[in-house]
Image (cartoon, rainbow, N blue to C red):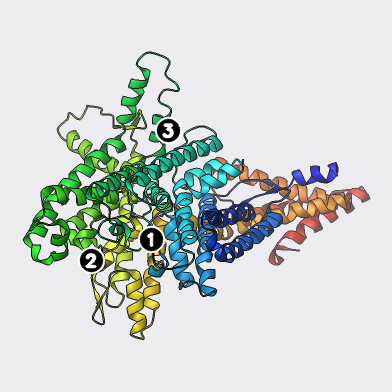
Amino acid sequence: MSIFKRRKETIYVNGLPMILGYLGLFMVAEAIITSFPLAILAFYPGEAGCWKDFVIPSVGALLIGLVLYLIFLAGRKSGKLHKNQESVMLILLWLSAVAVGAFPFYVSTLYGEMNMSYTESFFEAMSGYSTTGLTVFPTECYLGQGFEFSHVFLFHRAVMQFVGGVGLVLIFTSLINDKNNAKMFSAEGHNDHLLPNIAKTARWIFLIYIVYIALGTIGLVIVGLDPFEALCHSISCLATGGFSTRGEGLLYWQVGPGALSLGRQIAMEIIFEILMYLGSTSFVIHFLFFTIFSKTKEKGGAKRRFLQTFRDFELRFSVIFILIIAFMATAGTWMYINQNIGLYGDYLTYAGSDHMTILESFRYNFFYSVCALSTTGYSNAGPLAPATGSLAALGDFAIILSIFAMSIGGATGSTAGGVKQWRFGIAIKDFAWSWRSKSKNDRTVSTHQMARHGEIVDVEDSDKTEAYNYILLYIVTLIIGSSIIAMLPYTDFRSSIYNYSSALSTLGLTVFDFEVNGTVIHSFLDYRDCLKAAGESLLPYNIMLIDCIVAMMFARLEIFICIYAAKGLFYDPLMRFAADGRHRGLIHTLKRDRTAAVSHENLVKAEAIDIIIEAYGELTKAVIESKGTHGKLKTRDLYDVMEKKRNELMLLSESSENEAQKNKCIQMASYINAYLPPKRRV
């Protein structure tokens, strides 16, 4: 047994096999995550009939995961990943999680419990894990609509947002200890290495998350929400997701059946705003505040650390930006509604006034500004448009500002999407630095610095390049994705650009403003139902969903990572094969044949192979010395050296007087000759 174990430990697995082995481990974890919503049955035992909707996907994921793990990784040591393969692994982990998370909706449909195609189920799961909040969840399946299993499925949506907000890779890397953890952790967009050990970092992030969720839940319960709904909304706010337990969203507690008093409504909105803002703030900042007294022994140290932390650029930028956007949108909405007050009869009844006050406008727009910058899909504008709760009621000016705000998004290392405040800040600062440099002496040396996570850091040219490249790529992606939706039947450009922006920034709010056969569209499901009622193809609807799915993936993992993954999965292997695949394949064959020759005691063949491998090593070293590590060894150069070694052995055999030595040289030359292409053999 000890010999078997020792032999197993010497086996290393690299590249794609290692990725598939890791994928197997992750799918085992995903099986547990998918079955976790069944825990809510302890409080709602009457919904136990949906157990199969979660057990079937969980068991399937568990079996597939175990098979992948046993085939590719069990009993082996993980090796190394090729360039960009950490991005490939990240994409596969996310897609597998979304695919498994979608199955409870689809299995429930197969049993006739709800009505969701697998494309819609995948869309819903992607929206949950990417913390977007766009939804195609059937209206009749929300609370209060008579659906038998509402609590379990709504909790499943909340769990997906919790896991997606914390980070799938963070959960995975906290379960296993591996040298590739740091690569994957950074590839997911985390800059929140709170501690050198990733497992300890994960524990801190979980602790911060749970404390905030608990406080938010308690606050919402005090305001008047049901404990279950308070928990789901706290998770959704902190994850900057936007899923609600009611089909009407916050409208339910404003003018719906569960309407709260005005004071409680405002208190609820304040709790939402605090949680959304906390979710859009880097976890590093949260960690610094949580540990502000832990490392300060000197007098006044805690105060100094607090002030240093508050100097963080993203923290200050978000506060200032929210106030500016809120005041601008407030003025725009106030003028727009009061000029068109006749269109808001329902609002006049709700407010009991013949006009909108500036404070009311500020209430709606401040909430919306926090929501847009944190990329959380909630809206409190329901009283302005009770029929739909549409944000279009705030006016086009507010919508334009919101597109700008959600495109910037939250802080790096937070649960929010968008370009990220750090990149946008670098672009703004670089503009200011360039402007100032025009008025300075050419000999003046300026340092470009910004405050980040309690420290002053230098902004290098590479940081500026990365920021500009990402902003440009974001804009190009936004134009292409919006154009795809705009080309679909009946759609208009305003709805197309807003909805795609919402998906690409993980905001999760929608503005539908077009008609299908005379019916006004207010949501994705309205678009589907109108096409279906008219007997038209659902292809445009599915294209719209797929387009948004891709945008949500781009948003959560960032566009660069998706491009690197595609490059690592397709382009890099092709280039390696085209450039040096043949001689690398030959070297692999030689090493394998040498092992077999030694085991069969064919030492002459082993010695001949050693000559080729030694020549390969010398050629590789020469290429590196002349062209650097990016230099490539040409296959024909290796064949030239092999021909030379073969000819030398043939000459040596002819000149040798020792018969044994002569035969040995001939055998070695014949072995080398056999590895050459047919045209080069003798």
* Residue marked by disc 3: 287
Mark 3 and mark 1: Cα distance apart in space? 30 Å
Q: Amino acid at mark 3?
A: Phe
Is 412 drawn above or below residue 229 in the view shown?
A: above
Tell me the residue that label 2 is attached to. 494
Rendered residue at 39%/78% (across/down) = 539
> How busy is the neighbourhood of tag 3: few (under 14 within 10 Å), some, or many (20 plus)?
some
Secondary element at image label 2: helix
Q: Position of residue 271 (x, y in %)?
A: 32, 44
**Is tag 3's residue or tag 1's residue first in the polypeptide sequence?**
3
Which badge, 2 or 3, is on the more N-terminal residue? 3
Quadrant in which the N terminus is drawn: top right
Determine which quarter of the picture holds residue 341: bottom left
Instruction: Identify the amino acid type marked 1.
Output: Ala
Q: Which quadrant does the C terminus fall into?
A: bottom right
Q: Quadrant of residue 563?
A: bottom left
Q: Secondary structure at mark 3?
A: helix
Residue at the disc numbered 1: 551
Q: Residue furthest top?
A: 299
Q: Does the image show residue 627?
A: no
Figure disc tally: 3
User: Closer to the observer: label 2 or label 3?
Assistant: 3
Tell me residue 430's x, y (percent). 25, 39
